[in-house]
Amino acid sequence: MLELVDLSKKFKQMYAVKNLNMFIEKGEIVGLLGPNGAGKSTAISMLSSLVEPTEGDVRFNNKSIIKNPAPLRKVIGVVPQEIALYEDLTAEENLQFFGRIYRLKGEALKRKVDEVLEQIGLTDRRKDIVKTFSGGMKRRLNIGVAMLHEPELIIMDEPTVGIDPQSRNYILETVKRLNQEKQMTVLYTSHYMEEVEYLCDRIYIMDKGNMIASGTKDEIKRILSAEKTILIQADFWNDKFINLLNDNPTINRVIITEKEITIIVSKEINIFPMLIKMAEDAKIELNSVDIKTPTLEDVFLHLTGRALRD
Amino acid sequence: MIGIFQTKIRMFIRSPWVFVMMTAMSIGFALIIGGTGAYTAITIPVYSASEGIQNSVIGDILEDSDVYTFEWLSEKEVLNRLSNNKAEAGVALHEDDFQLIVGVETPTSKIIEQTIEGAYAKKAQFEQIVDASDAATVAEREAILDELQVSIESPVFTIESSSFRGTDAFIYDNTFQTLFGFTLFFVIYTIAYNVLPILVEKKEGIWDRVILSPVKKWEMYIANLLYSFLVGYLQIVIIFSVFRYIVGVDFQGRFIETLLLMSVYVFAIVSLSILLTAIVKTVAQFNAILPIVAVSSAMIGGAYWPIEIVESQFLLTLSKVNPITYGMEMLNGAVVYQYPLQELLFPISILFLMGVVFMGVGIHLMERRHI
């Protein structure tokens, strides 16, 4: 349905996105994962024809949309990361406005507005001014606006940023329902690993403008099949312990946070006796040592040496 | 396009406070400053050295003077005022001549002298007319004088004279100066703050949403600019109407022409606002730059004071690229100087040209930057 071919975007002398290749098939939910600043929003802007790429091509049904974006624009709905709504208008007025610009009018517009309000759970608040809404409600309306013209492909750029868990859950369920009931194709970007894991059939992982991994959830997790992730917790760390970890040749990677250290080691290594010895030598008391089931977060750690939300 | 326009109007009705505030401030400032009488007639103390002068033809003529207010006092009071420097000149009026009492010879004293000489000449003229008649008694002479007065007030035919005016001759009317100046100044804020949402909508992604819809980009610009134009124009119509129909300023009979002329100025300011919006990156920058542009334009454009009193060649050169300069020139030309349309074509053309250039550059910058 939609394909990015060697897509790059350069701002001044810096590449925001470099040689991006990805495809989206009809009816899929595809995740685009990456930390803030990875280039996800730039990729989405190019993909939705809002920004012209410096190099490469965006193909919709095998035709380039760089010079002629109209066929793509007809069938996409975009949920931007920002709350792209008129805060001084009511929820209903916002939907009416965006419906009108998609040439909906009269009874059809009214019916569609009612339907969308129902889908996003804002029927009771339809007459309220948007600026009185909670963050979660604004996010839901932000999604509702993109659904008005029944797009075949909906592109969501971090639609759950800064909202409470309940609203977040509601949005995830709405996305799933849209995909299942209306066969809507979804491109979902996030830096929340668990959202992408829950929603998406296939996942692309970006970092610093590059695509660093892609595939189904299982395919991506298999990257870690030869390794295991161990989580070490203690009240404090000292330099000696960290040096011992870094100097140990059997440990492939060490990621340190305030109260946790994550290490990645080969699957066949029994690291426990070594860890206890190192802690004794460094005179620190360990609270726990756990082996984790690999997650996408671990894959990201493995690939970049950084946590997604660093 | 209509959808965008309707939404803008709906939001304007819901939150018209900038508009109301700027309109009220324009009216308030024009009333307060224009109404304080910054331009008032100079008061000249006079005393009658002979009896009956105040009630004679001379008294009547001096009473009618537009330039000076002649205040009748006693000789002592007149001299006191002069010695206390509370008056520039005083006058002692006799039956057939007068005495001008001045501390220092000034240009004003010459004009006072001319004014009073004129009154005496008029009196002599009246007396000669009466002498030439065959009136014998006082009653008959008074009857002839009354008849003469009636004839003067209802002449058989009138003569209209007109003169060429050089660029150096300048008429200052405080009411129009403040009304036009503050209207042109405050409308900049109203228009600019109605163009600003383009920047906000671009930053918040609303603009992108509309771009992805079937609405064409030119429709988006036209809807936004038409809305800003109409709001700015409405403000001017309200202000001028308040002064025309409530305060009673007659616009020298050119009210409708004045309103029509303002459309070119509003167009230029909408374009200037587009340019400013395109130059800045954030609302905070816009809020900082707008007062600088508006206030400095008003200062060098003649909105606060007549540009004719500015002598700095540098400021005068700067004023040539300032829409307010041409706005004031256009309004003063139409109302104060009563110029015909042909003579106003120069400021109209410059404003139109400014509008086209600012708009072109502004939209080009906006499109190139993709805020």
Image: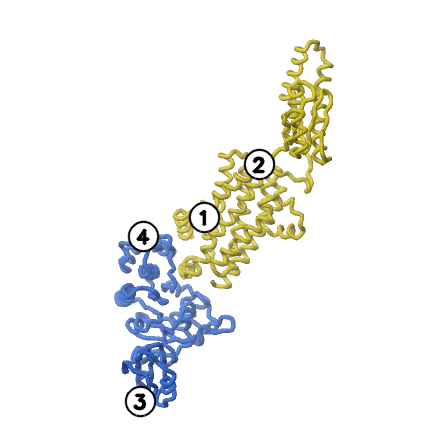
Dot 2: what SS? loop
Q: Residue A291 lies in what quarter of the image?
A: bottom left
Q: Amino acid at mark 1?
A: Val
Q: Residue A100 lies in what quarter of the image?
A: bottom left
Q: Residue A277 shows which numbered tag?
A: 3
Mark closer to the observer (3, 2): 3
Q: Amino acid at mark 4?
A: Asp
* Residue at image location 67% in from the left, 18% down from the top: B51
Question: Is any atom of residue A147 visible in this view?
Answer: no
Q: Amino acid at mark 2?
A: Gly
- Name chain A's colour: blue
Mark closer to the observer (1, 2): 2
Residue B106 vs residue B74, the one in the foreground: B74
Chain name for mark 3: A
How far apart are the alpha carbons under marks 4 and 2? 51 Å
How far apart are the alpha carbons under marks 3 and 2? 95 Å
Q: Are marks 3 and 4 on the same chain?
A: yes
- Label 1 sits on residue: B18
- Label 4 sits on residue: A128
Q: Residue B352 shows which numbered tag?
A: none
Compared with A89, A301 (above or below) is below
- Label 2 sits on residue: B37
Residue B38 vs residue B215, the one in the foreground: B38
Chain name for mark 4: A
Q: Amino acid at mark 3?
A: Lys
How far apart are the alpha carbons under marks 3 and 4? 63 Å
Q: Earlier in the sequence, mark 1 or mark 2?
A: 1
Q: Position of residue A203 (x, y in %)?
A: 33, 75
Compared with B36, A267 (above or below) is below
Mark closer to the observer (1, 4): 1
- Name chain B's colour: yellow
